[in-house]
Amino acid sequence: MTTKYLFFTGGVVSSVGKGVTAAATGLLLKERGFKVAVQKLDPYINVDPGTMSPYQHGEVYVLDDGAETDLDLGHYERFVDIRLSRVSNFTTGQVYAEIISKERRGDYLGGTIQVIPHITNEIKRRIGLVAKETGAEIVILEVGGTVGDIESQPFLEALRQLRNEVGRENCLFVHVTWLPTIGATGEIKTKPTQHSVAALRSIGISPNVIIARADQNVDKGLCEKIALFCDVEKDSVIPMKTADVLYEVPLLLEKLGVGELMLNKLGLKAMRKPNMRPWKKLVEEVRKPKPTVNVALVGKYVELQDAYMSVREALKHAGIANSVEVEIGWVHSADLEKDKGWDVIKKADAILVPGGFGSRGVEGKIMAARYARENKIPYLGLCLGMQVMCIDFARHVLELEEANSSEFDRSTEHPIIDLMLDQRSITDMGGTMRLGLYPCLLQKGTKAANAYAVPRVDERHRHRFEFNNAYRDSFAEHGMVFSGLSPDGKLVEIVELTDHPYMVASQFHPEFLSRPMKPHPLFVGLLKAAKERRRK
């Protein structure tokens, strides 16, 4: 079968849910029997988001093969339930780096390097890799940013060329746009959408489908107006009101006939009838009144909650599994050092400390771990959250007052957390950490082993520093259990406390493998313990 392409572009403003819409569409097509792959094109010149501030970019989502990618890939994996690879995300930086390295080698025989054809050809080559490596019948491709951004022009030009090369009958352009509401009158305006479509058409691309996002109901008359002024068929303007439950988006799209519309326009027929019952059941479960558990999330970037997108979703998944409503209390770890934010910690049924880099706010995270340990509050630490749990244990149980990570204090007398040996000679910061999927063997009878219910797991990592094995024996003598280890026994993957209802922490990032229908065991265990604490 010839590969079919769905190109998602954005209009008016960014962050209108283009990634979620693309992911939900992928689910609808997969449910109809097609093998689907998804790809995100990011116009920024960074090689990848690995070295970008979470305040700038939000979460860095790590894939099995260690690729550091855009958070939209998390949406793709969670909705479509597929495992993506590094070909599913590339940036302007990667494209230019590849072209410049070829030019330096002399591959172009002294020719002048230009955006067209050299840059656009490299973009098309990378798009072609997805179908080649995955064998996907339908490739969904999302262009980051909005139409009109100067950075995205080469991407859009490449898509225009690709449409002509693979055949118009094999391509579909879906434009996701925003309909603003005038506060004084409550009137929904279509003019910005008309302008964004005009900008797209000036590049040589006419959208086949327009998904009109709004915070309120969009009536048929407005859809017909958009169809008239944007030159698309009436049934190809899809009104999409903001959903109060994220996982209802596929159901709303299905109800609006988007799955069949896409197939009809691509000249395809469904191989089977979609089964959306599990998603209906999931949304019903989310909406059902449930007891609430309060989770204090102690982070360094809490002003931008997208920095913890996968953690937040993993908590939701585990909440559904435990039939509880999860209320997240966002606590800035630096505030705890100034004696602020403790009211959220003290009323929490569980404490979660996620990953992060740099010394800012670390002492606050250590204080949160100590509070959870001393007050027997269920605790889950992720990456840095595991390291601060160990630092607290060394300082206040082993009484090594100067214990620290060499990341934060290079001259510490007790480097409980230290740089991995193979990291010590590395100078480049980008893409050089321990990244991607690694195996972990679980120790029988531990909380971690009971949660997973299997002897071995593979989890995604993103870190440079590890637990220092020189301290392993003294930690074990004082009640710390190393419940997850690398197969050779050299790397500590999971730690937990024996005399605590649930104080578990992992060096890896379990949040990246949590799914709505398959919540991650460590998060399920945390909320089970929190629910029990609440009950008592």
Image (cartoon, helix red, strand yellow):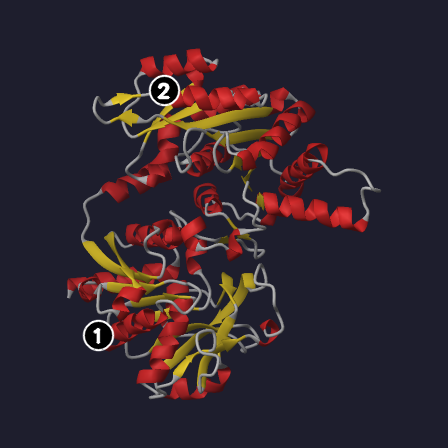
Residue furthest to the right: 109
Residue 162 lies left or right of residue 473; in this view the side is right
Relative to 55, say whether 208 is above or below.
Answer: above
Residue 535 in which image quadrant: bottom left
Tag 1 residue: 375
Quarter the N terminus occupies: top right
Q: Is residue 399 left or right of residue 290?
A: right
- Quadrant that contains the C terminus: bottom left
Give the distance between the C-alpha atoms of the residues marked 1 and 2, in whole angstroms. Answer: 55 Å
Q: Nearer the viewer, mark 1 or mark 2?
A: 2
**Amino acid beneath label 2:** Thr
Write the residue at 49% across / 19% down.
198
- Which residue was labeled with disc 2? 190
110 or 344, which is in the foreground? 110
- Label 1 neighbour load within 10 Å: few <14, some 14-19, many 20+: few
Q: Is residue 392 visible?
A: yes
State the residue in front, 90 or 322: 90
Residue 155 percent coordinates (x, y):
59, 34
Q: What is the secondary structure assignment of the residue under circle 1?
A: loop
- Name the kind of residue labelled 1 in the image: Asn
Is 201 above or below relative to 390?
above
Q: Residues within 10 Å of mark 2 (few under 14, many from 20)?
A: some
Residue at 26% from the left image edge and 72% from the top image edge? 372
What residue sits 41% from the left and 88% below the top? 474
